[in-house]
Amino acid sequence: MRISEGVEWAAHCCLLLDWMGVDEPVSTAKLAAGYGLPPAYLNKQLQPLVKAGILTSTAGKKGGFRLARSLADITLMDVLTAIEGPAEAFQCAEIRQNGVWADEPASVFRAPCAIDTAMRAAELEWRRALAAQTLAAVQANAELQAPGLRAQVRDWYGTPRP
């Protein structure tokens, strides 16, 4: 399974919006500048977060993005699903019914494919782990790893400290 960079970018931008601590929308260009990302591509990645109710978007010269809810109410699963969609990662193609087994009666394949069962169970656990991980917890870990990060973000982006 491969998760697109858009998931990482979206999660980082959510943290960044909270660290900035401003009430007005933040432009895509400003968000992108801090990570050296192309603004147009970042904007494309953030639009699904608006549709998912994670961000709000304001159009116009003073437009941009804001968090729609607190980081404590946004999980990594919310971000992943917004960007990648809800489809399951593993799709069983039932290849056991091909080749030398192609002529077997359907009754031979009544039991679910053992590989499909194992993969679905693993994916369910992975999804549960992502759903249990809020962006507030991720942010707290980031701040433990880099004390003063919130102040650094506000200084770099020119947003006032409380």
Image (cartoon, rainbow, N blue to C red):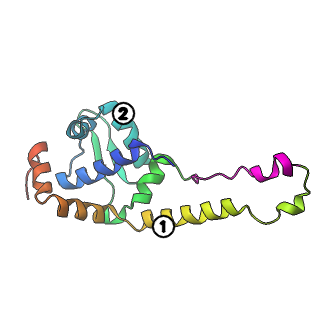
Q: Is residue 122 visible?
A: yes
> What label does residue 79 carry, if any?
none
Above or below for 119 versus 10: below
Tell me if residue 22 can be seen. Answer: no
Q: Residue at x 86, y 62 (%)?
A: 108
Amino acid type at circle 2 is: Tyr
Q: Position of residue 48 (x, y in %)?
A: 43, 45
Q: Which residue is mark 2?
A: 41
| Residue lying at 21% horizontally and 47% vertically, measured from the top left | 24
Depth check: 22 or 95 in front?
95
Q: Amino acid at mark 1?
A: Arg
Judge the density around disc 2: few (<14), some (14-19), many (≥20) Cα neighbours within 10 Å: few
Q: Secondary structure at mark 1?
A: helix
As helix, strand or loop, the secondary structure at mark 2 comes to helix
**Image location of residue 23, percent across then percent down:** 20, 52
Asked if residue 101 lies in the magenta stretch, the reply is yes
Residue 138 vertical position relative to residue 16 in the rendered view, above or below: below
Is there CB contact under 8 Å for labels 2 and 1? no
In this view, the residue in front, 144 or 43, is 144
In percent of width and height, residue 73 lies at 35, 65
Mark 2 or 1: the one toward you: 1
| Marks 2 and 1, the one that precedes in the sequence | 2
Looking at the rendering, which quadrant does residue 116 occupy?
bottom right
Residue at the front extreme, as displayed: 100
Instruction: State the residue in front, 145 or 103.
Output: 103
Q: Residue at x 92, y 57 (%)?
A: 105
Q: Which residues are magenta?
A: 87-102
Q: Disc 1 designates what residue? A: 128
Q: Magenta part mainly helix, strand or loop?
A: loop
